[in-house]
Amino acid sequence: MVVKGHVRDTACYKTLVDGYIKVKRIHKALRLAEEMTQRELFPDLEMQNTLRSFHAKWHVAFAE
């Protein structure tokens, strides 16, 4: 969702990615993270850790 005259910033992306991860929609979260870097916005340390944490949990659950 883009509101006319509003450009997404790092905080907006971080909030959206975190929300998608919490409801286990990892593909949406990763797509937003990719979109973010294409717009030359880069995740902060907290967002990187959130993505890594979910990725690690997902791989452990998948391996079991």
Image: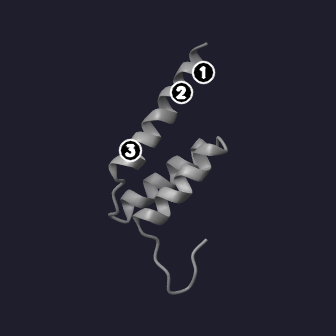
Determine the residue positioned at 36% across, 54% down: 43
Of the residues under marks 3 and 1, which one precedes in the sequence?
A: 3
Q: Which mark is residue 41?
A: none
Circle 2: residue type: Lys
Determine the residue positioned at 37% across, 66% down: 39
Label 1, on which residue?
61
Label 2, on which residue?
57
Residue lying farthest to the top in this orientation: 64
| Mark 2, secondary structure of its residue | helix
Where 30 falls versus 14 (above or below)? above
Where 30 falls versus 2 (above or below)? above
What distance separates the C-alpha of mark 1 from that of mark 2?
A: 6 Å
Residue lying farthest to the bottom in this orientation: 5
What distance separates the C-alpha of mark 3 from that of mark 1?
A: 20 Å
Label 3, on which residue?
48
Do labels 1 and 2 touch, CB within 8 Å?
Answer: yes
| Mark 1, secondary structure of its residue | helix
User: Residue 12 location, x and y as percent?
Assistant: 49, 65
User: Residue 63 location, x and y as percent?
Assistant: 57, 15
Of the residues under marks 3 and 2, which one precedes in the sequence?
A: 3
Determine the residue positioned at 56% across, 28% down: 58
Where 15 falls versus 28 (above or below)? below
Circle 3: residue type: Gln
Do labels 3 and 1 touch, CB within 8 Å?
Answer: no
User: Residue 28 location, x and y as percent?
Assistant: 59, 50
Residue 49 in which image quadrant:
top left
